[in-house]
Amino acid sequence: MRGIDPAPEPADLTTQRASGVPYAQLSLTQVRRALWDQQSGRCAYCERSLRAPDRDDHQTKIEHFHPQSSTEWTAACSRESGASSPNLAPVVWSNLLLCCDGNESARRAFTCDTAKGGVDICECFRNPKSWGRGPLVSIDGAGRAFPVAGLPAGAEEVVERTLNLNADTLVAARFEIIRARKRQIAKYRATHHGLTAHARSTLAARFREESFTAEFGSTLASLAASLSP
Ligand SMILES: [Zn+2]
Ligand SMILES: [Zn+2]
């Protein structure tokens, strides 16, 4: 999971909200597409690639960071949703994210929004849309995700259980990326007569750049950090 650079909200959403259309009756075609573009086609939480929402077989889900069903409304809920009141939270752009189906079709090992359900994590986590561009998790050499420093107490519980970001399939997919990139580093080392400080920073810059758009981008961001002097 990494910070999402918020794009301007689609005009369609502004208009519908101004007319007082409740979330259940919103037309979401433009919203879904704008979220997909904004997130470079990846799930906001696990960073799996998502099929474009204009395809019939897309499996994207619109997630509310501050849940629609939540009965809580604290200062953190207002800050993380970006809504001034609980009744606006379901329809403000800053509270909307696009997610994968969270293994819903497999009916087990749910992840992301499907695992989170109506749990309110505003106090113990941060909305990727309010976090800036950096990762919210770091990935270790085995492919496991851990919250980065600066997240509130309780963030580890969110990563591990509420969002289940260390589900076997996700860890295995990240580990595969780490293996492939390590082979790339070894090849670079062999053809450039060693891994000089310059070579390390060149590779780190390349991985960091890719992390903004690649599937499981946080894995690349963590590899870049490990290469940086
Ligand atoms: Zn996901
Ligand atoms: Zn909340």
Image: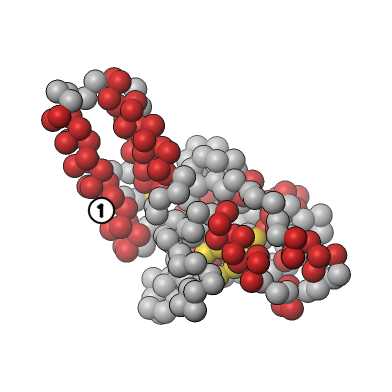
At x 56% / y 57%, what residue is drawn?
Answer: 37
Where on the picture, by quarter, is residue 49? Answer: bottom left
Indicate whether 12 appears above or below 47.
Answer: below
Where on the picture, by quarter, is residue 111? Answer: bottom left
At x 29% / y 26%, what residue is drawn?
Answer: 200
Viewer-proximal residue among 73 and 142: 142
**Which percent across, then down, holds residue 56?**
49, 79
Secondary element at tag 1: helix
Q: Which residue is mark 1?
A: 176
**Which percent across, then down, holds residue 123?**
64, 51
Indicate whether 108 appears above or below 72.
Answer: below
Q: Residue furthest right?
A: 19
Say which amino acid is labelled 1.
Glu
User: Could you tell whether 125 is left or right of 213 in the image?
Assistant: right
At x 49% / y 59%, what residue is drawn?
Answer: 41
At x 50% / y 37%, what residue is drawn?
Answer: 149
Q: Residues within 10 Å of mark 1 (few under 14, many from 20)?
A: some
Residue 62 visible to the viewer: yes
> Is label 1 within 8 A of ligand 1 (CB to nearest ligand atom)?
no
Viewport quadrant of the C terminus:
top left
Q: Residue furthest top?
A: 197
**Which percent across, then down, holds residue 21?**
81, 73
